[in-house]
Amino acid sequence: MNKSLLAGLVATFFATGATAMQPFTVKDVRVEGIQRVEAGTVFSYLPVKVGETMNDEKAAQVIKTLFATGFFNDVRIEVDGDVLIVVVQERPAIAQIDFVGLKEFDKEQLLKGLKEVGIAVSRTFDRATLEKAEQELKRQYLSRGRYAVTITTTITPLDRNRVAINFDVDEGDAAKIRQINIVGAHALKEKDLLGVLELKTPSWISWYTKSDQYSKQKLAADLETLRSYYLDRGFLEFNVESTQVSISPDKQAIYITISINEGDRYLVSSVKLAGDLTLPEEEFRASVKIKPGDVFSREKLNESTKSISDKLGAQGYAFANVNAAPDVDKEKHLVAFTIFVDPGKRAYVRRINVTGNTKTRDEVVRQEVRQMEGAWYDASRVVASRERIDRTGYFSEVNVETPPVPGTIDQVDVNINVAEKSTGNISLGAGYSSAEKVILSGSISQSNIFGSGKFLALQLNTGKLNRTLGINYTNPYFTVDGISQGFDLYYRTLNPTSLGYAFQSTSYGGGIRFGYPINEKETINLGLAIDETTIDITPVTAATPNQYVTFQAEHGDSNVTLPATVAWVSDTRDSAIYPTKGGTQRAGIEVAIPGADLTFYRATYQHQRYFQIVKDMVLMVNFDFGYGGGLSGQTLPFYKNYFAGGVSSVRGYDTASLGPVDPQYPDTRLGGTRKAVFNTEILMPFPGVDKSFRFGPFFDAGNVFTDNYTYAEEGLRSSVGLAAAWISPLGPLKFSYGQPINEQSSDKLQKFQFQFGTTF
């Protein structure tokens, strides 16, 4: 560029900058260049109106204000006589957002996150916001250990001043923690310390836990875990001196070094109680878990203060404060505690509010609430209320809050918010077998019919071998005291003639039952029924089991029984749908009382427990025993025998296939008078799927026995495998793949099994 032209441009620039706008009265305002933004929107931001005086200061203010809206790339002010002209160039709108190479994250999840930082379809495109979104996206990958991730963003202009944004993601491989060192550990073993950390070096289960992937948040949590571990073992002065995290040049390996100062171990010299003790000191003393002479433990100290708070909460002191003040003797390594108790003012419950129940009636929720309106607040009753509501099985979530009433110091509300789930199951099935040909089956059940909390089910099976029609009804609150009432009606036929058996049976009957709660978690169930079973084994063939022939010879073709049942049920689970702790127990006996054709008994006991191993990983253990026999010199009817095997018993073996077989027809299982089944299973959610789907490995063992088929001779059949359970919108669904361990040549195996819907 020649010097004369450059000088001319510079002179023109300074001449323009020196030119001042002559003040004038605005007669009209025009906006030019807008496409999507409404003219009214621009006018609303203008600091000058028609009839006002326009000058340089206001012109600069107009430009600054319109730029600040974020709608425009360029803003100019022009004057035509007394008309103010605002010329704008709009920023483009975002028409679409796409991702390429996305595997680690869900696209919808990322789109939601981008929207929070200002990047979304139909919003105005801003490059500075896009750069911020890129950094946030990269940060998300770094939190998953993807340190080699590269993100390339492409902006493609489209018609009508729009753009398309494409994120091309090369995720790379996740960096693994190759080594964790704890420097300064002397009193405690480094191996034990590494075991309590969530971050770990790669192991066989790392694919699921992701524990070998570093994140700053996980490390911070581990440092606090390490601190708690030492404080619970008496190291009152423990401190984390420093942490160092390094990554290899190829960004594939991470090395963590934690430097600590253990300090000395302290013993507890004394524990005193002070403050306003509303109860006798002896009652509070029983809640103190830490005693003089013990090694100091922060966990026990926290348990003590919480236990005292809970005791006060049960007395209505909803706002109690309990704090422990230490007095440290560093020379003798002793610490004394004074627990200060401030119960505050006693509070009562003003109102109980129930929300979220669009189908379920309020009274169905309220009848499970143990905290009463107008009564003193009781924290234990509030907790019991939440657990009872959850155990109904009508809701996927139950949340309870107790906020103070505004403007008061002695009132709280109990707010119960529930999230309803589908409580009806429809199960339809069709199948074909060489024995039964076409099989149609189905069931309909509703455990919360019309939102009333009552249970009603209809079961129908039209198989050629088995045909069943049954109705079940239960009213869990037959009385206001919680006594339940129910009845059952059924009609069943068994026709195994297609298998070579020359017998048929028909059973029909019904019964009534009542449940009497003896406390919050235990119930006694009583029932009485009548059953008539008719057996036809004419003509007798070689394939007819001998016990069937003997039974008909002794008792005739048709028999009536009057079975009475008594059962004790305990339910301490923290949730009926996704239990993590507690369990259920059931012990019962069924006796066919004298006065009818047959008399017998069947005793059962089942105990199921849940243990939380780590977060979201639960161990389930189940024991199921049964024992039966005849009374008054009779034998147990063959159609009352126990059976084992199948997806709900010993997996890997065909349904009801374990136990004695008919020597004349080896494919026929006869059942037994005694049953023993053991199950253990790990339940954990599948990564990336909500908690309604859980899976895990299992071990099963079990069998059924008779006097001629004993445990000493046959033992238990066992299996290992992998199972999955899904609470689907149509009902519970179970899958399992079991590998028998000690099967015999006569056993019927079925490695893959599934069950859909509810078993009645």
Image (cartoon, helix red, strand yellow):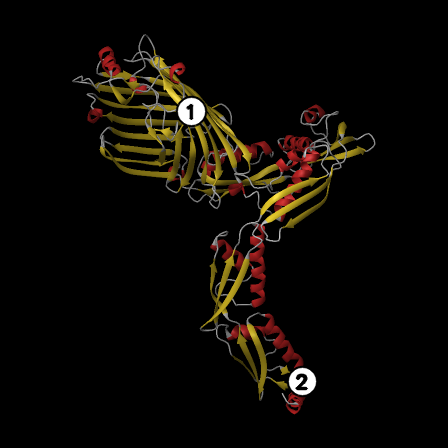
Q: Badge 2, how many Cα within 10 Å: few under 14, some, many 20+?
A: few
- In the rendered structure, the answer to whether residue 539 lies left or right of residue 450 reads left
User: At label 1, which amino acid type do we have?
Assistant: Ala
Quote the CA–CA distance across marks 2 and 1. Answer: 92 Å
Q: Are marks 2 and 1 in contact (CB under 8 Å)?
A: no
Give me the disc on residue 701.
1
Count of labels in the image: 2
Task: Give the residue furthest to the front.
Answer: 249
| Residue 744 visible in the picture | yes
Give me the disc on residue 388.
none
At x 70%, y 35%, the residue is: 230
Residue 334, percent across and down? Answer: 79, 30
| Residue 416 visible in the picture | no
Q: Could you say whether the residue bearing mark 2 is in a helix, strand or loop? A: helix
User: At label 2, which amino acid type do we have?
Assistant: Gly
- Reading the image, the residue beneath label 2 is 17
Q: Is residue 92 above or below residue 667?
A: below
